[in-house]
Image (spheres, rainbow, N blue to C red):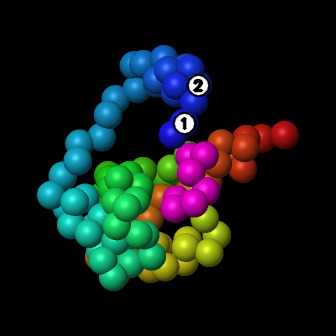
Amino acid sequence: MGNRALAMRRMRALRGIPLLAVTAEAVGLAGLLVRPGPIPERAEVDALHIATAAVHGIDYLLTWNCRHIANALMRSRIEALCRSAGFEPPIMCTPEELAEE
């Protein structure tokens, strides 16, 4: 499990940022990412994050989750599955990768 204090800090930082709707299209795309895709079933919430961002046309998906989202070994398969379903995948990276120097 994660650090509760850090999670609360992140939630406060997100106040006022609109939430994206989880649509039927996003659920369907998440299913493709899990079965037969690169994301394991135990991480289906991660697949839903990626799918929701793709369906809504979000440019970047910032995350510290390098196991299933910002993972260079999985990235090409995730992107290919999104594109084959008709969606442009977001650029999946950590905040540090996106930050300017």
Amino acid at the residue labelled 2 = Leu
Place of residue 75 in the rendered image (x, y in percent of width and height, measured from the top left): 55, 71
Q: Residue at x 56, y 46 (%)?
A: 63
Location of the C terminus (image quadrant): top right
**In this view of the protein, can residue 51 be seen by the observer?**
no
Where residue 59 sits in the image (x, y, percent)?
Answer: 49, 52
Measure the C-alpha gap from mark 2 to mark 1: 8 Å
Q: Which residue is mark 2?
A: 6
Image location of residue 65, percent across then percent down: 56, 51
Disc 2 or disc 1, which is closer to the eye? 1
At a point 23% along the width and 42% down the height, the residue shown is 21
The mark found on residue 2 in the picture is 1
The image quarter in which residue 3 lies: top right
Residue 51 position (above or below residue 83): above
Residue appearing at x 32%, y 34% in the figure: 19
User: The magenta stretch spans which residues?
Assistant: 63-69
